[in-house]
Image (cartoon, rainbow, N blue to C red):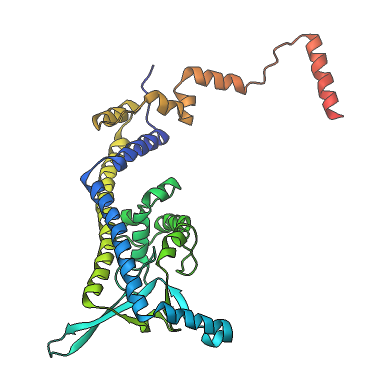
Amino acid sequence: MAKIRMNTELRNKLFNKIKHTFENEDTQERELYLQAREYVDEQYKSASELAKEVVERSYPPEDVATLRHFKSKYGQPCDVVAKDKCFYFAHNEDVNDEGETEETKSHFDFGLFGNLNGSEYHDYEGKKFALSYFREELKAKECNPDILAQQEGKDDNPHKTKYLDQCTKALGYNGSHNDCNGMTKEFDNPYYLDVIGTSYCRSRAIACTKDEFSKFEEWRIAKNNLVSKHQTWIDTITKQCDQLKIGLKAYRYLSEGIELATELGIQVDEAELIRTNSTGLTIYNPSNLASMIKGMKNKQLNNTREAKILARKQYEESLN
């Protein structure tokens, strides 16, 4: 048997198999990413409980109940209670160089796509967090949750936009914090709290202590850290895959690619690669090629006069 020559399909199959191994190796970078995600869960629990205390201190549940009663009685004019998951928390315990008290405030969004830098509107960093947090779930949906990490530092482009849109759609995010479903809605729901007022959250600063403010910042830092650890891990995989592509492109024979995989500690079944490769069946396996060609022939197995008459009769019957 002649050596099997490489082609694009075989290269892609080898590349994807080796890349899959890279992504599932117990590396230090992957472990730090997983630990960061666990810490986010812990921080979300403590920060959301604290947010409930702070918000209810400013908007007591009994007042909320009273206003809802008036709304049911008088309608729209008393419609001043709403649920929200993002808040401006502020404290007045800092002092400037002149000895004057200063207000310190920031926007904290508990939603899956909430900002990570205190901005009320910009959600790009929030998308990084969402894709990092639900990485396995998105992979299971055949999305690429690593797209933003892989495209870090690059301008927007069709490739990036395509896979980012697939991810956000799979998560149920439709470009608006008020228009979500699926995983995003399920993630956000526990963090909605009752607030009083009709203005946007920017002008609805809710008082808290400096210590409480610091705890909210710690939670937000944990979200940023998850994004950072995800980026570091994917960077290592990207660098390995870049070298892998160069090597596979240079190899002329499948045996060279399998040897590379073996050297990397990855077992690859050559027969399985060929068996699942459409062109491999045609080009490299004589038995399969012969069977395929024979199957393409519409052979007349019996050329006797009787057989021809029968075939003609069957043809005429099929026209009626």
Q: Is residue 175 left or right of residue 265?
A: right
Image quarter of the N terminus: top left
List x then y, in percent, for residue 180: 48, 64
Residue furthest out toward the front: 62
Q: Is residue 303 left or right of residue 132?
A: right
Give the residue displayed 34% in from the left and 57% down from the top. 148
List x then y, in percent, for residue 279: 47, 30
- Front position in the image: 188 or 80: 80
- Quarter location, residue 294: top right
Give the residue displayed 26% in from the left and 61% down from the top. 222
List x then y, in percent, for residue 237: 27, 46
Give the residue displayed 19% in from the left and 82% down from the top. 93
Residue 43 visible (yes or no): yes
Give the residue displayed 49% in from the left and 17% down from the top. 287
Q: Relative to residue 297, is residue 68 depicted above or below?
A: below
- Front position in the image: 311 or 182: 182
Image quarter of the C terminus: top right
Q: Relative to residue 40, is residue 85 depicted above or below?
A: below
- Quarter location, residue 247: top left
- Front position in the image: 40 or 317: 40
Q: How many marks?
A: 0
Q: Relative to residue 283, is residue 250 depicted above or below?
A: below
Residue 108 visible (yes or no): no
- Quarter location, residue 196: bottom left
Q: Is residue 67 left or right of residue 123?
A: right
List x then y, in percent, for residue 240: 26, 43
- Front position in the image: 66 or 236: 66
Q: Is residue 310 left or right of residue 200?
A: right
